[in-house]
Every structure is written in C-alpha cells, then in structure tokens.
Image: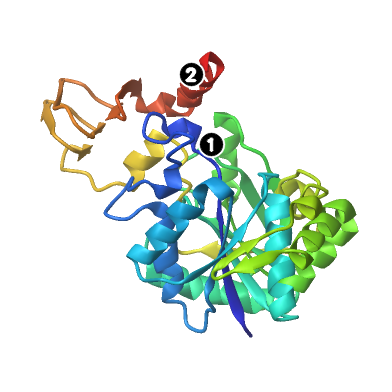
Amino acid sequence: MSLYPVVLCGGSGTRLWPASRPDRPKQFLPLTGQWSSFQETLLRLAVIEGAERTIVVTGPGMVADVLSQAAALEIPVTVLIEPQARDSGPAVAAAAAFVRALDGEGVILMLASDHYIGQPELFAEDALQAAEAASKGLIVTFGVQPTSPATGYGYIRPGEALEGGVFKVDAFVEKPDPATARGYLVDGYLWNSGNFAFRADVMLGEMEAFEPDLAAGAIASVEAATAEGPLVRLDAEGFVRATRKSLDYAVMERTKLAAVVPARFTWSDLGAWDAIWEASDRDGDGNAVSGDVILVDSLNTLVRTDGPTVGVIGLSDIAVIVEGGAVLVCRREDAQKVKHVAETLKARG
C-alpha cells in the first residue's frame, strides 16, 4: 500500500476574528503553541511510516505561506493550486485525480490544515488503521469520542463492525441543538472530524457516479495542469466546470462505502475561541494566556494580546483577544457568534 498525505488548506476562519482575517487565515497562525496548525499537520504526517511526499491543495493567495511555513520545518511539499475556491468537493477530486495519475491504487490520507490533534503517536497508528481499511475499497473517516454535547460539530452514527477495527457509517447528522447533542452522547455518536482515508480511484468512482460534472471538471483540470518545481497549477478552464459542492454533500452522505475509525486522539477543529481555550495549556485556575497579560481573581479565561498589556480582574469564562489593532471581548460560550462581527466588517468594506 502506498500512502499519499493530502492537506486541504483553504478558508479564512471568520469565527477567530480578530486574529484570523482574509489576509492571515487561521491555519497559518500559532494559536495553541509554537507552530501554526498547518505546520502541526505537516509534522504529524512526516512521521507516518511509508507516507509519500505531502500534497497541499490551496489557492493562489496562500501559496507563499504554504511554501515558507513548510520550508521552516524543512518538509518538502507538492502544492496543487486551485484557480478559484469551489468548496471541498472539487479540491478532493483534483487531489484524487493527481494521485491516481501517480499510482492507480494509491491511498490518500486527507487532512484539514486547521485542526488540532493531540497524541500524535496515536494519530499515526489510527491513520495507518484507516489507510489499511481504505486500501480495501472503503472511504474511511475519523470519528472522535465526544467530550461534551457540542453543538458546533456534525456527528456520525456508527453501525455494524467491519473487518480491521472500523465500523460502517449508518448516518452523518448535521450540527444539533443542545438537547439533541446530549442524546447523541448517550447513544454513542461520534464527532465528525472531517478527515478521511480513501483510495484515489474509489473516491473518483463515487464522484463520477454521484456528481459527474464535478468529477469531470476536476479530472480535466489535472490533465491540463502546468507544473513548475513543487507547484502544480490546475487548469482554470477545467476546474471552473467542477460543481461547487462540499465533499460531504457530494459523496459522504450518499455513498455506501463510508466507514469510521473511532479515533483515540483528542481533536478540535479550532473553529472558535472556546475551542482554542480547550486546546491550550491552562494554569491552575483554568486560564490560558498569550502575550503581556495580568490576571487577578479570574477563572477559565482565554486572554491573548500581540502588543498592549491586558489586565483582567474578577472575571470568569470570557475571552479577550487583542490582535492586529482590534479588540474582541465575549463570553466563551458565545464564541460561535464572533463570525457575525467579521461579517459586519466585511459588509462595511
């Protein structure tokens, strides 16, 4: 089995304003440690036994960041450049077509660039388990054991046990309300991490069955691509013909080949500031801080500043973010609403 790591590197992370903005997307920011989440993803993949050179799928505006951050780790990458953003379906299809041209039965380990994964050694073991199941024709996702009735994640209902420690996926379900999420925990549902393992030819076969225009456009964009060193520019005329649709809607919610590996590692999509707090190192009072911060009688706070000193007195369960000349203050439980601030700023131009 040949394993080809693929990293999807797009999006801007509007719920992490003011740190994440269109000109500095969240995957390139050091949000939980020394390295960005993109760099952490590359480091996780670099230690997987037998993995080929990592392929990164991104847009023209992010190529410089991809190359510079990979170079800082001395990890070589191949970069597939999308002419325009068309959701995850065309990106995955193009990556599958590219790998299929290299290796007819190559297995892709497809990861998002902006997630947090703890216990990298457990991730490597689970990834190889998923890849082995994928080599037999399954499309395998990583399902994470919930630690709370989170409403910001989609869920997976596992079904019957299959060979190799994976389970059939009975259903993918959308983000629930709090009461439904509590029921999901009782019923053994898993968080849908949005990371996958699949054979390139199997994924393309399913896309051709369910979304033939999407598949045809992506394949054409690879066949007419131009390469220069580590950069592969997908053909714009072909790529624009690929239907704009997510991988979940295009394939995962329709295929009969979906399987899930119950992940043993901790995981977060780092989608909002409450998730950053969860993934960060915290002091004995539950506070996570970055920068010049003074706390007095405060509990379970997230406070970050890239310049001025920030003092917080007598507060609990809040987030204070001072970055890029802007300030955000909110309750941690309201972190999902930060996107409304970013949307308002975008509307103002």
Q: Which residue is mark 2?
A: 345
| Color scheme of the displayed model | rainbow
Q: Nearer the viewer, residue 251 or 106?
A: 106
- Residue 309 image offset from top left, x and y in percent: 13, 27
Residue lying at 62% horizontally and 83% vertically, measured from the top left = 2
Q: Is residue 167 left or right of residue 23?
A: right
- Residue 228 image offset from top left, x and y in percent: 59, 68
Q: What type is the residue that disc 1 sits on?
A: Gly
Secondary element type, mark 1: loop
In the rendered image, the quadrant that contains the N terminus is bottom right
Residue lying at 60% horizontally and 50% vertically, measured from the top left = 189
Secondary element type, mark 2: helix
Q: What type is the residue that disc 2 sits on?
A: Leu
Q: Which mark is residue 43?
A: none
Q: Earlier in the sequence, mark 2 or mark 1?
A: 1
Q: Which mark is residue 152?
A: 1
Quick one: label 2, few (<14), some, or many (20+) residues within 10 Å? few
- Residue 58 image offset from top left, x and y in percent: 57, 53
Q: Is residue 241 left or right of residue 200?
A: right
Q: Is residue 315 left or right of residue 10?
A: left
CA gap between label 2 and label 1 equals 23 Å
Position of 72 relative to 91 (above/below): below
Residue lying at 42% horizontally and 34% vertically, measured from the top left = 16
